[in-house]
């Protein structure tokens, strides 16, 4: 465990933050915006000793000066998850958050948004500050600080060493390859591979930056990688996702601003795949080709090795083609904390690769994957108002159909929300 791991999983100090005041999250639940600052008595961030920070950083509450917070996680439909971004505005009329007040009011400082009730802590975003700018409306006028933070995965794109003189890692498993890449970057956080993949990997010379190498690794076995809410990396099979499904299928389970698309941008009739330096193999969906003519894409940077021939490439191709068959599909929808406890629970507990089944007029969309989320929180002393907008992606088992008359509502079973049409 590093000091960063300790920080990421530290419970919420119940003296921090403000009451949530959201349906499903009554007192004592609180929401907090925090920055990791070294505290020595009443002094903030004033002592640094060698490579170790004297006393260690601790979460400092910034919620009461927070005038607005927005963050996003995940990515766009048909794209990879990327490092999310948080934007926080703090009132700085007192000058307490000005850069000269502490060397930690600067890039490199960790921030997080978190909720808790004294027993349970649910982190919502963990990132590293890249901008800490002060501004004002004029002399002796309103003063503020704008903070921008990126999720921890962004740090991997900053490690772009020279290619190794030789290659390493031939025959690595997925876990071994991920660990090798993160060691190359001196990764200070945890990681979790949540899928069992039989394929092993070709040797590499780390010619690309670490994040690009990591993307190429997970693409080669049809997985995704993204930073968790705590800051660790999660590698997950696209076909299975997280195992959690959220249902909004009754007329009284309101969502806002459902956006759909009905176009051919996602359609593929064939894919050409090859391992690095290997022969190209073409995989075709004949039915699609017959209706939409030829629509092809190619990837020649696959890094897996399969003793059984092309089994690993066939698995990737099947995933790509099965996700490229639909024109009509859900794109985004939003829920707000004021709509009820079910909506509040989804805002707080949902995550990337969770599945959603969603009613939209006469249609029910089933089994679409959450690929991205945008959060907007308005903070007040008596509580918060929280809105989340979800972007959805097509998975191999995603379907849509006409609504049937009989409907049963939403109930939570284990870690899955279950609703039956």
Image (cartoon, helix red, strand yellow):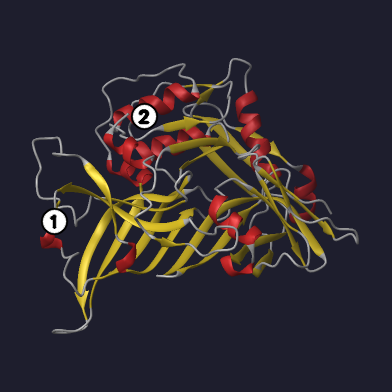
The tag on residue 312 is none
Looking at the rendering, in which quadrant would you find the C terminus?
bottom right
Q: Quadrant of residue 185?
A: top left
Residue 172 percent across, percent down from the top left: 45, 19
Q: For this view, does 27 lie left or right of residue 87?
A: right
x, y percent for residue 381: 40, 70
Local secondary structure at mark 1: loop
Return the residue at label 1: 102
Looking at the image, which residue is at 32% across and 55% down?
34
| Residue 14, above or below 57 | below
The residue that appears at 50% across and 47% down in the rendered structure is 80
Q: Which residue bears the numbered disc 2? A: 181
Nearer to me, 395 or 109:
109
Q: Sequence-wise, which precedes: disc 2 or disc 1?
A: 1
In the visual, does 100 lie left or right of 240?
left
**Which is more foreground, mark 2 or mark 1?**
1
The residue lying at 60 percent from left, 38 percent from top is 272
Q: Quadrant of residue 163?
A: top left
Q: Secondary structure at mark 2?
A: helix
Question: How far is mark 2 from mark 1, CA to CA?
Answer: 34 Å
Q: Nearer the viewer, residue 157 or 138?
A: 138
Question: Quadrant of the image for the N terminus?
Answer: top left
Depth check, front residue: 95 or 206? 95
Mark count = 2
Label 2 close to label 1 by CB (< 8 Å)? no
In the image, 279 versus 160, the foreground residue is 160
Q: Position of residue 186 (x, y in %)?
A: 28, 31
Q: Residue at x 35, y 56 (%)?
A: 16
Residue 90 image point, x, y percent: 29, 68
Q: Is residue 208 visible?
A: no
How crowded is the residue under tag 1: few (<14 C-alpha within 10 Å), some, or many (20+)?
A: some
């Amino acid at each position: 465990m590093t000091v960063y791991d300790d920080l990421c999983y530290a419970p919420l100090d119940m003296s921090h933050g403000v009451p949530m005041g959201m349906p499903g999250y009554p007192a004592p639940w609180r929401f907090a915006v925090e920055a990791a600052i070294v505290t020595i008595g009443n002094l903030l961030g004033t002592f640094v000793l060698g490579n170790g920070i004297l006393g260690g950083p601790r979460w400092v509450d910034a919620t009461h000066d927070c005038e607005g917070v927005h963050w996003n996680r995940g990515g766009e439909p048909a794209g990879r998850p990327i490092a999310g971004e948080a934007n926080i505005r703090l009132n700085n009329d007192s000058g307490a958050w000005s850069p000269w007040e502490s060397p930690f009011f600067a890039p490199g400082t960790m921030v997080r948004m978190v909720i808790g009730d004294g027993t349970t802590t649910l982190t919502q975003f963990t990132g590293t500050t890249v901008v800490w700018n002060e501004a004002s409306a004029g002399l002796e006028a309103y003063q503020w600080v704008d903070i921008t933070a990126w999720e921890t995965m962004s740090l991997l794109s900053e490690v772009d060493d020279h290619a190794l003189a030789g290659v390493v890692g031939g025959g690595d498993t997925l876990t071994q390859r991920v660990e090798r890449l993160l060691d190359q970057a001196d990764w200070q956080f945890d990681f979790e591979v949540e899928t069992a993949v039989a394929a092993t990997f070709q040797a590499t010379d780390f010619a690309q930056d670490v994040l690009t190498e990591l993307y190429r690794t997970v693409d080669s076995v049809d997985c995704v990688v993204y930073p968790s809410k705590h800051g660790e990396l999660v590698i997950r099979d696209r076909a299975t996702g997280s195992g959690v499904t959220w249902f909004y299928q009754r007329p009284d389970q309101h969502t806002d601003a459902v956006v759909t698309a009905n176009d051919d941008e996602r359609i593929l009739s064939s894919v050409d795949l090859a391992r690095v330096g290997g022969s190209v193999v073409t995989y075709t969906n004949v039915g699609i080709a017959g209706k939409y003519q030829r629509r092809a894409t190619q990837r020649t940077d696959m890094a897996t090795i399969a003793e059984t021939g092309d089994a690993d490439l066939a698995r990737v191709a099947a995933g790509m083609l099965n996700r490229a068959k639909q024109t009509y599909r859900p794109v985004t929808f939003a829920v707000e904390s004021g709509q009820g406890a079910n909506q509040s629970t989804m805002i707080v507990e949902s995550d990337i690769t969770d599945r959603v089944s969603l009613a939209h007029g006469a249609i029910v969309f089933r089994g679409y994957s959450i690929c991205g989320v945008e959060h907007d929180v308005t903070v007040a002393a008596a509580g918060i108002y929280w809105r989340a907008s979800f972007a959805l992606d097509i998975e191999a088992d995603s379907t849509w159909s006409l609504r049937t008359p009989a409907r049963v509502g939403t109930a939570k079973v284990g870690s899955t929300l279950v609703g039956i049409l």
